[in-house]
Amino acid sequence: MKDQIITKKILNWYDLNKRSLPWRKNVSQSKKHYYTLVSEFMLQQTQVVTVIPYFNRFINKIPNLKKLSIIRDKELIKLWEGLGYYSRVRNLKKTAKIVISEYYGKIPNNYKDLISLPGIGNYTANAILAIAFNKSHIPLDGNIERVLKRYLYLKKDKEIQKDNLIKKTSIFGISSRASDYAQALMELGAMICKPKNPECSRCPIQKNCKSYKRKDFDLAKIVKKKKEKYFILKVYRKNQKYLLVKNTKFNFLKNLVIFPMEELSNPKNFNENLNFKMSNMNMNIKIQYLKNSKSFPSSCWFDKRKLNNYILPTFTKNVVKYLEKNQ
């Protein structure tokens, strides 16, 4: 009974407060399935406000799975440019090809088949099942995790382990409106139970929230130690052009265009020029200017004045900006 009360309160709040998002449009079932797939891939590690314009542009150019499965990689990457984590879009296309060839063009509606597709893990599979197929799954994203931790006042390491949090989602109950309910929980975390300064006065489940009762909203996290990495980034410049290479060497930015780089293991007295945070890696980069360019596989000279014409990761563009400011 208690679960039903929580469910009803959250859904009532959602009906009155949900945001108008492009992937929530009232469309046919096949489009809803496709919109959910694309949006969930985009929303992995990326905020809603960032994703909206990319989603609209993507759907406008690639309106269905069939077109996604056959679009040229160059055009596909260009549409994704700036969103980062490019393995997502490559996996999205691979998934589209598999769905077209092995599932008669229909996205699978069961966990086993979904989880077997490239780029789809536990969270994304559950999100697709709930949102696209109205199945009673609660996808544990960062927003729902935050609501759960505060509502139940979960602080200890064993309490905030992912497996335990997944079990604890049962506190939210289930609804025949599974699609709306999954999105309602996400929305509650995004709009009300925010990382900082949660708006408890607007929260539909404030009354039974243990963190609210204790007035303690700090969130316990399992700290992932960042890996310190050191690189020499080699700059070859000719007139108005820089030499760039296709990255087949490093796991980050795989198959994308970067400056020639060399990783160093625990160098002493390393004075970096640049620092980038990428996933769980802290990249310390020292710039090395070189005159005589040796032959690199899959290399090309890029005109710095026409950067927007090329498909380049944000990482590479930021290096160019640094070089132009510090030349």
Image (cartoon, helix red, strand yellow):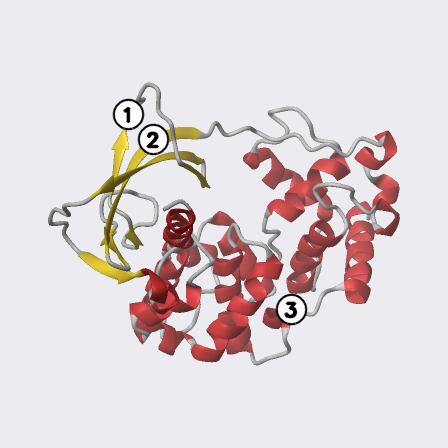
Q: For mark 2, what is the residue?
A: 230
Q: As drawn, is 139 to the left or to the right of 325?
A: right
The amino acid on which the numbered mark 1 sits, given as a three-letter code, is Ser
The amino acid on which the numbered mark 2 sits, given as a three-letter code, is Tyr
Disc nearest the viewer among 3 and 2: 2
Q: For mark 1, what is the residue?
A: 265
Q: As drawn, is 38 to the left or to the right of 251?
A: right
Q: Label 2 neighbourhood size at 10 Å, few (<14), some (14-19), many (20+)?
A: many
Q: Are marks 2 and 1 in contact (CB under 8 Å)?
A: yes
The residue located at (39%, 54%) in the rendering is 317
The amino acid on which the numbered mark 3 sits, given as a three-letter code, is Leu
Residue that extends furthest to the top in the rendered view of this protein: 268
The residue located at (15%, 48%) in the rendering is 293
Q: Are marks 3 and 1 in contact (CB under 8 Å)?
A: no
The spot of residue 27 in percent (x, y) is 59, 80
Against 203, residue 90 (above or below) is below
For the question of whether residue 139 can be seen, the reply is yes
Q: Are marks 3 and 2 in contact (CB under 8 Å)?
A: no
For the question of whether residue 135 can be seen, the reply is no
Q: Which mark is residue 21?
A: 3
Disc nearest the viewer among 3 and 1: 1
Disc with the residue nearer the chain's start (3 vs 2): 3
Disc with the residue nearer the chain's start (2 vs 1): 2
The spot of residue 147 in percent (x, y) is 71, 43
Q: Label 1 neighbourhood size at 10 Å, few (<14), some (14-19), many (20+)?
A: few
Task: Tell me the distance, in whole angstroms, between the alpha carbons under discs 3 and 1.
Answer: 46 Å
Q: As drawn, is 240 to the left or to the right of 86?
A: left
